[in-house]
Image (tube, rainbow, N blue to C red):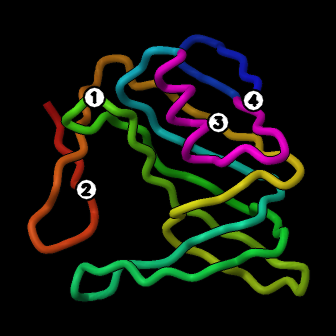
Amino acid sequence: MEWTRSGEDLFVRLDPGEEVHESLQKLADEVGFNAAAITSGIGRTRDTLYGFMNEEGVYIRRNLDSPSELVSLSGNIARKENGDAFTHIHCCWCDDDNTVHAGHMFQCVTHVVAEIHIRILSQAIMTRCPLPGVELLGLQFS
């Protein structure tokens, strides 16, 4: 991973084999921010686990193992109550047959490259807290 900063903006390049969530959480700790918006991301990834939350608040997960184009990525970075960085990311991928796959990203490994823009929210305090009855950690503002 390499990154550059311009004011509150970070531009990140992830290299082959780097997992997206792990890399961005590590970046939050390295740079030292507590809240950020992930505004865009493109690249080519593999070993993807994605899905959606059903009406009962349970995530349905799907695999996309083969390398695919990362067409669009967005989300946010906050801290959990214990201080660990937490990434919440949604994406669209396109496989080699031009079939689009989209949803909540649980896991995704960079295959060729991933280029991601992050806007640090230096004045915001965002904390991820458990929500009753669903798998999602809710976003709380202080």
- Residue beneath the point at 82% across and 69% down: 68
Q: Which residue is mark 4?
A: 1
For badge 1, the amino acid type reads Gly
First in sequence: mark 4 vs mark 1:
4
Name the image quarter holding residue 126: top left
Is 43 within the magenta? no
Cα separation, mark 4 vs mark 3, equals 13 Å
- Range covered by the magenta-colored residues: 12-30
Cα separation, mark 1 vs mark 3, equals 23 Å
First in sequence: mark 1 vs mark 3:
1
Q: Which residue is mark 1?
A: 83
Q: Which mark is residue 137?
A: 2
Cα separation, mark 1 vs mark 2, equals 14 Å
Q: Identify the secondary structure beneath mark 4.
A: loop
First in sequence: mark 4 vs mark 3:
4
Q: Is residue 11 left or right of residue 53?
A: right
- Residue beneath the point at 37% across and 18% down: 122
Q: Which mark is residue 28?
A: none
Q: Identify the secondary structure beneath mark 2.
A: strand
Q: Nearer the viewer, residue 13 or 30?
A: 30
- Residue beneath the point at 33% across and 86% down: 54
Q: Residues within 10 Å of mark 2 (few under 14, many from 20)?
A: some
First in sequence: mark 4 vs mark 2:
4
Q: Quadrant of the N terminus?
A: top right
- Do residues under tags 1 and 2 come within 8 Å of each other at their CB atoms? no
Name the image quarter holding residue 47: bottom right
Q: Which residue is mark 3?
A: 117
Q: Residues within 10 Å of mark 1 (few under 14, many from 20)?
A: few
Is 17 within the magenta? yes
